[in-house]
Structures are given as structure tokens and as C-alpha cells.
Image (tube, rainbow, N blue to C red):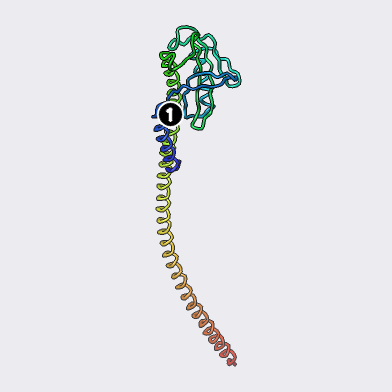
Amino acid sequence: MKPGVLLTLLLMFVLTVTGYAQKSPVDETDMAIKGIPRKGQRVTIQLDSKRVDDSWLKWITEKIGKVKADKGVYTMDGVVVESISKTPIRIISKVDATPTGTSVWWSIDLGNAYLSKDATPVQWKASETYLKDFARMLYREDLALQVAEAEKALVASQNNHMTVIQKADAIKKDIEKNKAKKIEIQQQLVQNAAELQQYNNQIDMNLKEQEAARADIVNMRVALEAVKERMNKIE
């Protein structure tokens, strides 16, 4: 992985951690469910709505009990959440995407009253903690994923660094081989020049030998003609 890509990932990680450092406030807000306005609590989580929705359904199913889902509305009837109420309660919940993330909203019917910041402050505080715990759990999970990705990126960067070093070593070896080959070629050129000079000397010697051979032929012819002439003079 290129250093610039790793740096970008790390910057994104730092910025995300900074964002998570902020608290996840819970506010009181009304929401109309099937045309009926209900007062409830809402926490906004700066994560993808699909992921938050899936996690919320899993969370309340595991922590509270059976959930009925109808067109994005979750209902839980006659459930007991010890931290909120010792008696059975009714919960209606909905998860929505927002411009700043995802909102998790729920309305709780305590049996004798609806959850309200002013009317049921003790239950309000308990359910507020419940929502905040859920938000913290999601943020921790997301940070764990980002840490894992950053660690993978770091390993990839280290591996890339080793590859670059190995490549540099290979280039250095090629340079040394090239230098050795150059010396070998230079030696061959010197040897070749010496051989060429030797061949030129041999050619010069051969030319002299040819000249001497031609002179011998001429001398032989002269001698032969002289012998023939003497033979012709014999009576």
C-alpha cells in the first residue's frame, strides 16, 4: 500500500475517534406511529442506518425479548427490563436515517404512565442509560473495525516497504553484474585487439612469403631455361 493511502486511512481514523469522543445525547421527542403521536426518547448515532437498524433489532431481542416488526416499527409487549421497570412494559421503537447519521427512537408504556422526562424521571434516566450504552457499543464495534483495517494497512505498508528494499537490493546486484560484464567486455576487446594485431602481422608475413615464393618461381624458370639452353648446345 502506498504511503499516501495509509496516511489517508490514519487521518480518517483519527477524525472518527475525535467524533466518537463526543457524547451521544438522548433527547425527548414525539413521533407519530401509525398516525398516533407518541412521546419518547431518541439518540442519534453517526453510523450507517442499515447497520444501526440491524444492531438495534439484535440488541433489543437479546437484551429484552421477542420483537414484532411491522414496516420498520418494532413492538415489544409485556416485556420486563429490570433497569427500567420491575413490571411488564410495552415498547414501540423505530430507527430512521438522518442528515447527521441515524436516530434510534423508542416510546415506553410503563402501564400506569408513558415514559417522560418530567413525569417519570427515574425510569427516564434508566432508559436513557440503556440507549447510551447501545450507542457506545456500536461506536466501540466501529472503532474496532477501523483499528483492524488500520492494522492491515500498516502491515501492507510494511510489506510494501520490504518489497521496495528488496527491489533496491536486486537493482544493486544488477548494477554489479553490469559492471562485471563491462569489465569482461573491455578485457575481451583488449584481447580482440591483440588477436587482430596478430592476424595483421600474419597477413604481412604471408605477403612477404608470397613475394619470396614468386621470386623463387622466377629464379627456377631462369635456371630451367639456362639448363635447356645448355642441353641444346650439346652436339
Q: Residue at x 47, y 26 (%)?
A: 44
The percent position of residue 98, horizontal first and vertical second, equals 52, 30
| Vertical comparison of 131 with 97: above or below | above
Q: In the rendered image, which quarter is residue 221 located in? A: bottom right
The percent position of residue 107, horizontal first and vertical second, equals 51, 17
Pointer 1: what residue? 143
The percent position of residue 189, horizontal first and vertical second, equals 43, 64
3 and 121: which is toward the camera: 121
Of all residues, the one furthest to the front in this rendering is 118
Q: Is residue 154 left or right of residue 32?
A: left
2 and 201: which is toward the camera: 2
Q: Quadrant of the C terminus?
A: bottom right
Q: Residue at x 44, y 23 (%)?
A: 26
159 and 61: which is toward the camera: 61
How many numbered discs, if any?
1
Q: Residue at x 47, y 78 (%)?
A: 208
Looking at numbered disc 1 in the image, what kind of residue is underneath it?
A: Leu
Element type at mark 1 = helix
Q: Residues within 10 Å of mark 1 (few under 14, many from 20)?
A: some
| Vertical comparison of 31 with 235: above or below | above
The percent position of residue 207, horizontal first and vertical second, equals 49, 77
Q: In the rendered image, which quarter is residue 10 located in? A: top left
76 and 147: which is toward the camera: 76
Q: In the rendered image, which quarter is residue 224 located in? A: bottom right
Q: Quadrant of the N terminus?
A: top left
| Vertical comparison of 143 with 1: above or below | above
